[in-house]
Image (tube, grey):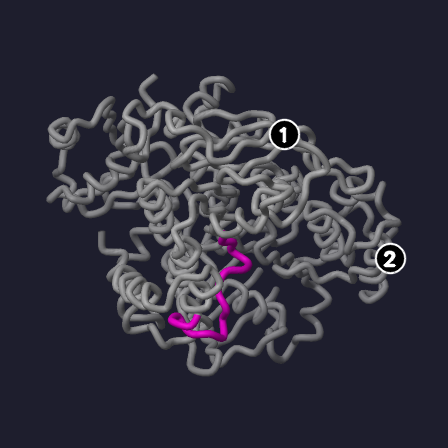
Amino acid sequence: MNTKVKHNNLSPTGENPGRETGPIITVENLVKKFGSFTANDNLTFDVYRGEIFGFLGANGAGKTTALRILCGLSTPTSGEVKVAGFDIYRETEKIKKNIGYMSQKFSLYEDLTVAENIQLYAGIYGISPKKRKAKMTELLKKLELEGAKNKLIAGLPLGWKQKLAFSVAVFHEPKIVFLDEPTGGVDPITRRRFWDMIYEAASNGITVFVTTHYMDEAEYCDRVSIMDAGKIEALDTPAKLKEQYNAKNMDEVFIQIAR
Amino acid sequence: MITINNISKSYEKTPALNNISLTVNEGELFGLIGPDGAGKTTLMRILMTLLLPDSGQAYMNGLDVVSDFKKIRHIVGYMPGRFSLYQDLSVEENLSFFATVFGTTVKNNYDLIRDIYYQIEPFKKRRAGKLSGGMKQKLALSCALIHSPKILVLDEPTTGVDAVSRKEFWEMLKKLQKKEITILVSTPYMDEANLCDRVALIQNGRILDVDSPQRITEKFPRKIIRVRSDETYRLINDLRKYEKTESAFAFGQFVHFTGIDDKVEIPELDKYLEKLNHKNVLAEKVEPGIEDVFMSLMKEASPGPSEGGEKKQYNI
């Protein structure tokens, strides 16, 4: 196998990075029902520390439901779930402190400035004012946004917004960052720049849990799960999935599973 | 047929469309390909007579979008980007409402929508607001077709839609095209360009190129080498540090490499990467895709209305 992918320096072997250090998310027999409808049908999977985990599935397959549970926003009907070592039923507040979240639809406040957005999120996550200031200066410099510090988010180009939204989501140095379709609608260069940031975060030890409809992006993940009708139908590295489904790319794998 | 001559449109001081000219032939399946903020929706709203251009002219089957707007509305079908049907009416109520507004009946034009509508017909008593994303999309398309339009305009019908549903939607469009409907469709998904007869690549209110998808990629002048190794992220970073690199970007399981000129050869790359201890390196020439072309044209084009720094971030 010459296609195995290793993105970070946490696992010298390259295979299943993070397995050595144990899972950061464990899900056992997760079931979520809405009335008679089963949105998550007995999900069992682990996400390893420091890996980029792709969470794929057709519309309505149950991704958002599972994502909300993992973020501590919704309680399972049954099953055991631990996120960053905390129990999903009893320790949701601790979970929220240890994760970051970004989606395409909701990320930054459009009518606040760049600096105000950073300060707001830093405040919510309880970062001390002193540390906040130093970190903000560092971040603005890194993003080359020093000149735009006092500009409203609404006036920024989409590419900048997304970079900033991601940076804000990991500003409090969470153990895990959840990205819900972070790259929808952006131009192809910005989309790749965004993945550069994901790789960088992962190489700094942040576990990345990401959903996407771009199948080429599935190839960038260490491991990928594919949901259909509430169940996880496949979970492995992109290379192994392609081998298993005799497919030349992840698009073909996805279509075989979800059609 | 759609004719667009030198259309410009600004929102206050922000230019949205900059001197756009374009022709969509009768019966063509034409794609407007570009990211959010490129101006796709603005152009479509002008064509749909919902927005006035600042300057320039546009014609739908010869009718002027400004002076003939009433006539145009009878011959066009429009599926806006945001779901715009009545959420509290049922599936069949929505459909018959739109038929009635256009002075026709569902029965009259049922042939045209049968292939699409039969998939949601089992749910015809359900309120539109309670439908799944895929079903909403099919209902919206049915409503846009119920008065048998000559020209169909679809604003990002596949955005946020999974890969399987996207494929099915394009199959529906291909079938409609056979019924002699001119179709203009916009999408931010570059791979969908290949499903169109011709496309316009659009960015920052400017057209970068118009042609068939085959021609667009064929005439791309640069040599692209795709590279793979065991460590993708390190590979990208190392390639970017290489003195002969113009660009290195992830493309699925590969990294697409363009040299400072086309004289950079594969063995040179192999050697460079070997020295950096990359394992299982594979480098081979590859034909460019639409995304390669789009990215290259983006870099050439001016950075547009945004920060001067915008261009800088692309220079790798």
Residue annotated with mark 1: A43
Judging from the image, mark 1 belongs to the subunit labelled: A
| Residue at image point 50% right, 60% down | A107
Q: Nearer the viewer, residue B90 or A174?
A: A174
Left or right of A152? Residue B142 is right
Asked if badges 1 and 2 are on one and the same chain, I answer no
Q: Based on the displayed image, in which of its 4 quarters is residue B89 positioned?
A: bottom right
Q: Residue furthest bottom?
A: B12
Front residue of this view, candidates B86 and B9: B86
Q: Quadrant of residue B258?
A: top left
| Residue numbers of the magenta segment | A101-116
Between marks 1 and 2, how big is the CA–CA gap?
Answer: 39 Å
The vertical placement of A23 against B8, above or below, is: above
Disc 2 marks which amino acid? Glu
Q: Residue sitting at 68 percent across and 58 percent down?
A: B150
For the point 86% across and 57% down, which residue is it? B93
